Image (cartoon, rainbow, N blue to C red):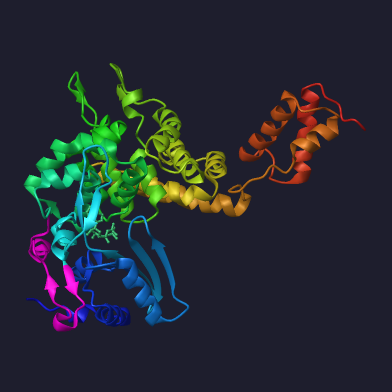
């Protein structure tokens, strides 16, 4: 039997071992911590302990040994307890009693009874997550790996301990977890598992949207998220949870003219971007930037394929998609929406003569998100033609340079109009009305177009001029 004592290098393991010895209850480290240590990955500071007895009592005993200040949360309904311990960093240790689970078909919630270590390992989702390390004095550090999880790590395989049809049907969230782990670890899903996911895909509907979103976010945050989305698509899960993304698939040809497959293009953009940022929401923007291409697609014999206004339609789709996927309906959603709306602007700019006024407008609209927008646009270049790529990138360099120059000169990035609506109303003695908006907009446009400088005096003068044109008179003039 393999001994992994070296992985029990934290003080907390000695304390748990002593507590379990005192109580005469066997305890094991199990799950993600064991997997990640064997793989040499960061364990993320979470440790799962399974007790062959009461997990809550063991947690209480451990807390007693650690001293009064230890914080423990007990979850009686689940028979689990969580404890925070500060060693080299904050560790979250979760205790659970070994259990045996049986499921009914309508819910993810199992009927639970006390069980043996073997029962508990049987109920785990994947062989690589079912490995346990003993904390008993007699065999401290020995690995209990009944399903050859260690072999699967070597073979880079996601496999279920039991018949996959039972594992996935019992708890369909495991289908998302299989794809998520495959993506995070760069593993292959074993064929029988893959088939079973396809077969059981409809059962994903009994899983809460929030849990699915959690897994989607983890897939998006992986090093190469496209892999996970391709698996979701191939198993048919994507069609159920996020059909708009599947709609991007396919390349039509008319009169010998085709367009690119926007599903694979979007995934490529997501991968490209992911090389440069871990910003989850920027990654979402990459995935969604062309989401309205199917809805706006036209074939125009003189031009070919067009997707007019797909950025506007796409931005409008973002809130609906966030709601449907149970993603937050807050400033994160508005940020994604804004980036989808603006994603073509730097490209258009780089194709045309770059005017100061166009740069000012882009800076004004993108505000502090301008750097993220530029990163998204660079990732959007997926052409196979190296000449084209080079040309685009050098144009973007020029746009970036101009952005810096103009921002230094005009400071429009977080532009606030130097003349407020209140001042306009006060000056002309008017109540809120359309004219106030017209004057405000005219001042904004004049500044962005470089007609007047971004200063109070000039803006005030311009306001008087515009007011006059509209037949307004200053109250004391
Ligand atoms: P990560 O922290 O990256 O999500 P993890 O393996 O620690 O990885 P958790 O969700 O914290 O994942 O779960 C801890 C352990 O509990 C897993 O390793 C697995 O053994 C078991 N587990 C979690 N969810 C399920 C599930 N839906 N079905 C069966 N076993 C599960």
Image quadrant in which the N terminus is located: bottom left
Q: Quadrant of residue 318?
A: top left
Q: Position of residue 319 (x, y in %)?
A: 45, 35
Residue 290 counted in the magenta span: no
Image quadrant in which the C terminus is located: top right
Residue 155 counted in the magenta span: yes
Quarter for ligand 1?
A: bottom left
- Front in this rendered view, residue 316 or 354: 316
Q: Quadrant of residue 466?
A: top right
Q: Looking at the image, which residue is at 39% across and 70% down?
A: 83
Q: Looking at the image, which residue is at 33% across and 62% down?
A: 80
Answer whether residue 418 is visible to the viewer in this image: yes
In this rendering, the answer to whether 281 lies above or below 241 is below
Relative to 46, 309 lies left or right: right
Give the magenta range.
Answer: 132-158
Q: Position of residue 108 (x, y in %)?
A: 27, 44
Q: Quadrant of residue 149?
A: bottom left
Relative to 2, 8 lies left or right: right
Answer whether residue 94 is visible to the viewer in this image: no
In this rendering, the answer to whether 158 lies above or below 269 is below
Q: Looking at the image, which residue is at 78% across and 44% down?
A: 457
- Front in this rendered view, residue 423 or 448: 423
Q: Position of residue 169 (x, y in %)?
A: 17, 42
- Front in this rendered view, residue 226 or 183: 183
Give the farthest residue toward the top: 301
Give the farthest residue toward the right: 476
């Amino acid at each position: 039997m393999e001994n992994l004592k070296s992985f029990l290098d934290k003080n907390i393991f000695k304390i748990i071992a002593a507590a379990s010895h005192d109580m005469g209850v066997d305890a094991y480290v199990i799950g993600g911590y064991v997997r990640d240590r064997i793989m040499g990955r960061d364990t993320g500071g979470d440790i799962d302990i399974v007790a062959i007895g009461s997990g809550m009592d063991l947690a209480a005993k451990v807390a007693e040994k650690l001293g009064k200040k230890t914080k423990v949360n007990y979850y009686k309904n689940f028979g689990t307890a969580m404890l925070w311990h500060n060693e080299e960093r904050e560790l979250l240790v979760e205790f659970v009693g070994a259990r045996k689970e049986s499921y009914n078909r309508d819910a993810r919630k199992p009927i639970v009874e006390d069980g043996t270590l073997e029962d508990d390992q049987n109920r785990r989702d994947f062989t690589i997550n079912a490995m346990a390390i003993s904390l008993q004095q007699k065999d401290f550090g020995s690995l209990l790996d009944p399903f050859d999880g260690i072999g699967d790590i070597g073979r880079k395989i996601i496999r279920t301990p039991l018949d996959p049809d039972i594992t996935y049907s019992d708890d369909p969230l495991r289908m998302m977890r299989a794809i998520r782990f495959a993506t995070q670890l760069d593993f292959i899903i074993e064929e029988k598992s893959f088939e079973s996911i396809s077969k059981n895909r409809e059962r994903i509907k009994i899983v809460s949207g929030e849990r699915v979103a959690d897994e989607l976010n983890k897939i998006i945050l992986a090093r190469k998220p496209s892999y996970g989305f391709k698996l979701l698509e191939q198993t048919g899960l994507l069609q159920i949870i996020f059909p708009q993304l599947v709609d991007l698939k396919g390349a039509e040809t008319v009169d010998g003219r085709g367009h690119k497959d926007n599903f694979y293009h979007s995934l490529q953009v997501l991968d490209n971007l992911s090389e440069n940022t871990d910003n989850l929401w920027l990654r979402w923007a990459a995935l969604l930037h062309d989401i309205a291409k199917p809805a706006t697609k036209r074939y125009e014999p003189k031009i070919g394929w067009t997707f007019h206004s797909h950025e506007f339609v796409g931005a409008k789709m973002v809130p609906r998609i966030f709601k449907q996927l149970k993603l937050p309906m807050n400033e994160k959603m508005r940020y994604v929406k804004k980036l989808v709306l603006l994603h073509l602007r730097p490209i258009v700019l780089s194709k045309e003569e770059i005017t100061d006024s166009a740069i000012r407008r882009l800076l004004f609209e993108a505000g502090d998100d301008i750097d993220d927008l530029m990163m998204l646009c660079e990732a959007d270049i997926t052409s196979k033609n190296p000449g084209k790529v080079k040309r685009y990138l050098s144009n973007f360099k020029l746009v970036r340079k101009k952005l810096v120059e103009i921002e230094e000169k005009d400071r429009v990035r977080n532009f606030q109009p130097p003349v407020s609506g209140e001042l306009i109303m006060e000056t002309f003695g008017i109540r809120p009305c359309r004219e106030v908006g017209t004057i405000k907009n005219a001042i904004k446009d004049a500044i962005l177009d470089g007609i007047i400088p971004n200063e109070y005096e000039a803006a005030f003068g311009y306001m008087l001029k515009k007011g006059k044109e509209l037949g307004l008179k200053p109250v004391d003039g």
